[in-house]
Every structure is written in structure tokens, then in C-alpha cells.
Amino acid sequence: MALVNTDAIVLRTYNLAEADRIAVCLTRSAGLVRAVAKGARRMKSRFGAALEPFTIIRLAFYERENRELVSISNVEILKSHFNLAAQLEASEVLAYMGELVSEFAPPHEANEKLFRMVTACVEALETAPKSTRMVLRYFEVWLLRLGIRLHHGRPYHPQTQGKDERFHRSLDVEVLHLRRLADLPICQTAFDTWRQIYNTERPHAALGLAVPATRYRPSPIAFPDRLAEPEYYATDEVRRVRQDGATSFHGRHVKLPRAFAGLHLAFRPTAMDGVWRVFFARSPVAEVDLRVRENNNVSVRHASEHTSGLSPV
């Protein structure tokens, strides 16, 4: 049994048994870990507020070979971000980022760049809580550079949300209508219990009566040591985005998200004359309409206005 000491950021927590809690942490030297905090839910817990989401901590834990869960020995708060929890947009962005990192980061594989990226995003929100859209753009552009493409349905278009609608109906029928959930801890316990049933016990007609856990496969793609520059077709018109988020195209000023500053984007013509689609790597990020001109600027429609938009906010 080895003792590990490392800086970490708490991504999310969920209850375990009657008095314990599991904290999903992104650590500097050990990657993503799921750590058991024994007695964390007791009134006089020694952990206090150290395991609140997006608290930066000094974490000491014991790990055993071939065991996913580690056991927390000690926690020390290095920096808290409790004030962000009271700001709806900021807390939603942090929860979204935490869920993404929890899902795609390989466990027990250190990645200094990922750790710095997540902590930098949290620090940026702490400094400017209203900059949620900007922070989220930077985070998602970084994901695109890793080859991770995100899909979000359009608001007010339930026809694009079929699977989500069906999932929420099951949650409503099998959990929410069965009992009154008095507070958030009770609610979380009910969700955690149902998640285990939904993924490992409940047969799904769409899977031939198999359970989702039989279909899940972790990605074999490892994090690169260095992010590669995107490659484009020889027929693309490639432009570099300036620090202010702008570039020039056919003598026009094109304003793009500042998250792309310093990166190269490709312009490709569409079937409509004068309309070009802008790509970052394989992902469309905007549409430029050269037919609409105002003070040498052109009309830009960003990807967030499309079905496959980058940002859910």
C-alpha cells in the first residue's frame, strides 16, 4: 500500500454507504482518482469543507494495485471557490466541466497540462465570474484539439433530444414519483442508487435487453504530450486568428471567438454562393456570409447557433 501526496482539484462527490463519500479528484501527479473519504458525511467530519467541488486541495491517499478506489489519509485546503457556488451560470459551467473531465480523463494517469487547464479555468471564473462563455469556449477548443467533439441539441427543439427525453421519463417514473425527496443529500443518494440499477441491472430494449455497462468501453486514445496543429485540405483557405479573435478573409474583417487566438482555421465554400463554413480541425465552428457587409465587416454565424454548437450556455 503506497502513500501518495499531490495537489488536486475536486471535480464532484457522491455518497457512499451511510456516512462516507467518494470524491472524484483530478490530481497533478496521479491523474484522475476516485477517493473514499470515510466519515465525511458525519457532523464532526475531519474533512470539513475540503471536499466541496472545485476546491483546490493537498491530497494524501493510499492506493493499492488493481484497485480503482483509493483511501484518503489527509486533506488540506489550498484554495476554495465557495463563492462560485452561489452564481448559477458559473456553477453550471463548473459542473459541466467536472462531468466531462470525469468521463474522458483516464484514471491514474498523470497529465500536468490537463490539471493546469482545469485549474486555470476555475481561477478565471473566480476572477471574472461573468466570463462563463469565454472560459467555456477556451475549455471546449482545448477538447477539440484533443479530438473530442461535443454535441449539444438546439434549445426548444425536443425532436433533437429523443434519447434524453426517454432517459428523463425513466428517471421520473422510476425515482421521482416513488417518494418525496426531502433534501439534496437524499436526492443524490436516490440518484446514485438508481444509476447503478440503470447501468448494470435494468435491461434496455434498445440494447437487445442488455445493460449499458456491457456496451461501455474506455477510450484507447492516450493524451498526447503535445497538442498537434490541425491539418486541412489543400483546397481550404486557411487563416490565422489574431489575439483579438479576428482575422481577414477576402478583404473583409471576420470576428471569431477569442478562444481561437493564435490558431489556424479553414474556410470552405458552401453550396450557397458567398457563404463559407469555418472549421477548426474537423469541427465546424462558424459560418461567414460575404454577401452581408457593414463597415467592411461580414456576417458571422457561430456554431452555438447550430445543432452541433460548442457551448450549452
Image (cartoon, helix red, strand yellow):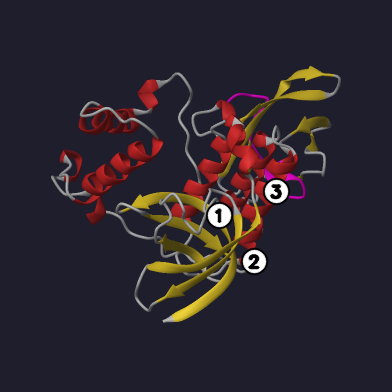
Q: On screen, 65 above or below 21?
A: below
Say whether marks 3 and 1 touch (CB < 8 Å): no
Q: What residue type is labelled 1?
A: Ala
Q: What stretch is highlighted in magenta?
A: 259-277
Point 41% across, 51% down: residue: 41
Using the image, tell me which numbered label, if any, was put on residue 97: none
Does 48 appear in magenta? Answer: no
Choose the circle earlier in sequence order: 1 or 2: 1
The span from disc 2 to disc 3 (Cα, nearest Å) is 23 Å
- Give SS at disc 2: loop
| Label ID, residue 123 | 3
Dot 1 falls on a residue whose secondary structure is: loop
Sooner in the amino-acid sequence: mark 2 or mark 3? 3
Q: Indicate the position of residue 162 as horizontal and vertical percent values.
A: 32, 28
Is label 1 or label 2 in front? 1
Question: Looking at the image, is 145 positioned above or below residue 298?
Answer: below
Residue at left 31%, top 31%? 181
Question: Which quarter of the rendered picture does the N terminus lie within?
Answer: bottom left
Going by the picture, which residue comes out furthest to the front?
Answer: 44
Q: Give the amino acid type for the residue marked by disc 3 in the picture.
A: Glu
Numbered disc 3: secondary structure: helix
175 left or right of 83? Answer: left
- Which callout, 3 or 1, points at the residue further toward the start of the chain? 1
Q: How crowded is mark 2: few (under 14 residues within 10 Å), some or many (20 or more)?
A: few
Q: Which of marks 2 and 3 is in front?
A: 3
Q: Residue 270: in sight, yes or no?
A: no
Q: Where is residue 281 in the image (x, y as percent from the top left)?
A: 60, 49
User: Which residue lies under the disc numbered 2?
Assistant: 226
Q: Which residue is under mark 1?
A: 50
